[in-house]
Amino acid sequence: MGTLNVTALLLQFWPHIVGAIGAVLVGWRLRQSGINTERAQHMREMLAAAEDRLEMDREATDIERRVSGMSDDKARKEAMRWSRY
């Protein structure tokens, strides 16, 4: 008699059970898409920072090549143009 009651409950409430499972799955997918969007944004920011560092390194290399043949005074003047302080 106990299994009959459980079976009757399952037959009566199966649409609600399936709906609840579906809602959980949809919520999980939405959460995952939000996480993936955040990850993509973070990777874009990291890529932009790496590109900026690469550009700064290129500029520094160009300046170093230019000043390598200069006298110390000229090199100091050139370095002062590019220093941040």
Image: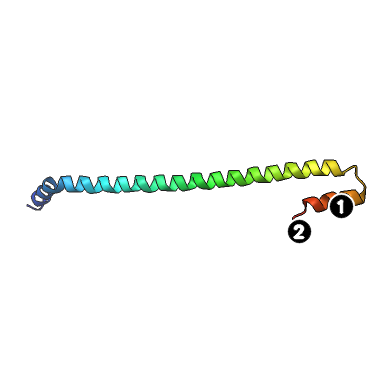
What residue is at 55 percent from the left and 44 percent from the top? 44
Query: How many other residues sit within 10 Å of disc 1, few (<14), some (14-19) or many (≥20)?
Result: few
Image location (x, y in percent) of residue 77: 86, 51
Q: Find residue 25 and report its image quarter.
A: top left
| Apparent side of residue 82 relative to residue 12 in the rendered image (left or right) | right
What residue is at 10 percent from the left and 53 percent from the top? 2
**What is the distance, in whole Å, between disc 2 and disc 1 at their CAs?**
14 Å
Badge 2 vs badge 1, beta-carbon distance below 8 Å = no
Image quarter (top left, top right, bottom left or bottom right) of the C terminus = bottom right
| Apparent side of residue 61 relative to residue 73 in the rendered image (left or right) | left
Image location (x, y in percent) of residue 55: 69, 42
Image disc number at residue 18: none
What residue is at 26 percent from the left and 45 percent from the top? 22
What kind of residue is marked 1? Arg
What colouring style does the render use? rainbow
Image location (x, y in percent) of residue 39: 49, 46
**Residue lying farthest bottom?**
85
Q: Secondary structure at mark 2?
A: loop
Residue that badge 2 annotates: 85
Residue that badge 1 annotates: 76
Q: Find residue 47 and report its image quarter.
A: top right
Nearer-the-camera pick, 28 or 54: 54
| Apparent side of residue 55 relative to residue 23 in the rendered image (left or right) | right
**Residue lying farthest left?**
1
Image location (x, y in percent) of residue 60: 77, 45
Nearer-the-camera pick, 34 or 70: 70
Nearer-the-camera pick, 46 or 66: 66
What kind of residue is marked 2? Tyr
Query: How many other residues sit within 10 Å of disc 2, few (<14), some (14-19) or many (≥20)?
Result: few
Q: How many numbered dots are placed on residues in this image?
A: 2
**Looking at the image, is mark 2 or mark 1 earlier in the sequence?**
1
